[in-house]
Every structure is written in structure tokens, then in C-alpha cells.
Image (tube, rainbow, N blue to C red):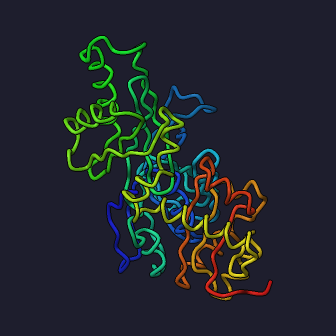
Amino acid sequence: MIINELDPKHSHCSVTIESAEDLWTMRRLIAKGDVVVTRSSRVVKREDEYSRPDKGERVKVTVALSVEEVHLDSSIERIRLKGTIVEASDESVTKVGSHSLTVSPGHALTLRKTRWSPLDTQLLRPEGDSASRFVLVAADRREAGIGTLSGSHLAVSTTVESGLGGKMAEEQSSLPYISKVAAVVAQVYQDGDRIAVAGPGNFKNAIANKVRERTEPGHVSVLEGLDLTGSDGVRALIKTPAFQELAKDSLVVAMQRLVSEAVRRVSTSDPKVAYSLPRVAAAAAAGAVESSAVSDDVFSSGVDEAELVGVLNDIESKGGRVYLADSSMEYGKQVSSFGGIVALLRYAVRF
């Protein structure tokens, strides 16, 4: 998430949403009574001489919506807001009745609250290295998988095929392929990203050298210990010891450790673990939750959205940490198997 302005003293912030994880953050921030200001499209009926009375013109306007309802649709990555328009950049936009807005990655918005809490600031600026982003390359001389890891959310961008068959007759024949991989990496690269290049053999070194020419040389690392390439290689890369060391302070590694420890505690009947929303809610109410992971497909388990948001905010207001697990990844699937939410406890709680 890009934080364009954060002013707790005057209870507002301006942000640009970049990912599904940002949507979860905004869902936890936005509450009934808040005002959300963003660009939207509205149908405006013109009362011109030649206008059709049953038709209107769709125009882009900036509206300020006083929120009455907020819902997260994580499956298609959007937040739906419903309320009343209190301000509009086009005077012909009606303010009568209920209106709705849809917020998705790429949207910029301003949030105004009647009261700004320390938790609100913490949600926007969490402790640790949660803002770090990685570009992952899993390659050999045949194919290269390229993906991005933002927070705990992995997105595989593309797979580049070399078209080379058998052993290379000349090293020169691989240059177009290497250049194409470097060009794709440069396209998805953002300032501050760290780039991890891995794969079997030594061919990854040639790719890394070309990537260094197109990005920041000091941000490119060549990692050993990966035998897969393509999209499967990108997914496997984050589990290798070399990447775990490179990203030891990142959110995704913290998530993996949390889930592994939760599985261990469940398998050994350790009472300092809770899973499913009712039990995690009880532990949160007791102030016992040290850290918790929630799957991005948690709503498929039938949990109540408002109750879940309340529990997550309760955990962090009492000093716990909350992580969002990508359900397409192995650790995310494990969280889903626990009913969509699992927590490590400071002490045992009787349910």
C-alpha cells in the first residue's frame, strides 16, 4: 500500500491500494460512520432539450461517501461500500438515497474518521519488514518463472520459454532468452524490491548478471538449493533455506513459522493453540493471542465478516499480531484446514 498522507491528529489518511492484502487492511480500518473520498462513475441525467428522459450520461466524479455498510469480497479482490453521498465534484450528482462504491487494487482514496485510534496507525504502518517486496525468478536454460511476493501474497507473473533444445551449440544463442527474462523482471521491479534468482545448474548466474544491468545490482541475489523452474519453481523458492535466510525478517517467513508451530502444537496436544473463529475469539477476549493467521478464503468457512474483523482488531489492540495467509500457498491451505483462522496463545485458555 502506498501511504500518500497519514494524519492521525486530524483523523484521516490518503492511500493507494496495491494488493489483496491492502484490501484486508482497509476492511479493518473502514467502519460505519467513516467518510471515504474516491473517484467513481455515476449516471447523470441531463435536462437538455434533446436529452432522452430515460437515459443518462456516465461521468467520472469524485464523491465523499458516508459509510453505512462495508463488505469485503476477497474472492474477486474488492470492497463494496454502501452509504450516502455527502460531497460530489459534479453538482448534478444526486445525494438522495443510498449509493455504493467499489474499491479494488489500483484505487486511491481518502479515509476520514471521527476518531483515529493507535490501532488504525498500526494497521497502516505495522512493525517489522512487512512492506518488503520480492521479485522471484526460478530459471534454467529452458524456462524461467517470474513472480512477485508482496507481504504474504504470491503472484506468478509469467513463464518465459527459451526455445532452446539440447545442448547449446553456442553460448550466444541464449542471449535473446536471457535478455527477455531480464526485461520482464525490470518491468515488474519497483524501487526497493529485492530480487532472488534461483534454479538448477549455473545458468541462473547469467540471468542474474543481465538482471543486474536492468535493475539495482545490489538488490539481486543468486540462491542455491532449488531444482525446479517455471511457476512451480517460483512457488517452491520461498520454502528453500536460502530464501528463508534472505527474507528472514519478512512477513511471509514469519507466517510460515507461525503455521508450522501451530501444526506442531496441534499434533502434540499443546493447549496453547486455538483454531476456528469461536475459539480464537474466546482467546482474543482473554488477551491470550500472541499471533494469528487468517486465510484469505476464510469466508468460505461460513464465518461472519463483521465478527471476524472485530476479533482481528481485538487481537492487535491487545498486543497480538495478525497475518493474512495466501490460500493458494501451502501454509495458506493449512490455515484453511483449521477453519480459516489459527492462533498461537501466550497461555492455555479453556474453551
Front residue of 58/158: it is: 158
Q: Is residue 122 visible?
A: yes
Residue 329, position as x, y percentages in the image: 59, 49
**Could you tell whether 59 is left or right of 14 in the image?**
right
Q: Nearer the viewer, residue 297 or 266?
A: 266
| Number of marks drawn | 0
Q: Quadrant of the N terminus?
A: bottom left
Please state the horizontal and vertical placement of residue 227, each as a whole percent of the image: 48, 37
- Please identify the quadrant where the C terminus is shown: bottom right
Residue displayed at 40% across by 73% down: 127
Q: Position of residue 242 (x, y in %)?
A: 40, 53
- Picture residue at 58% right of the left edge, 60% below the top: 84
* Image location (x, y in percent) of residue 314: 61, 80
Q: Is residue 346 left or right of residue 194?
A: right
Does residue 99 appear in the picture of this structure? no
Question: Residue 243 vs residue 312: left or right?
Answer: left
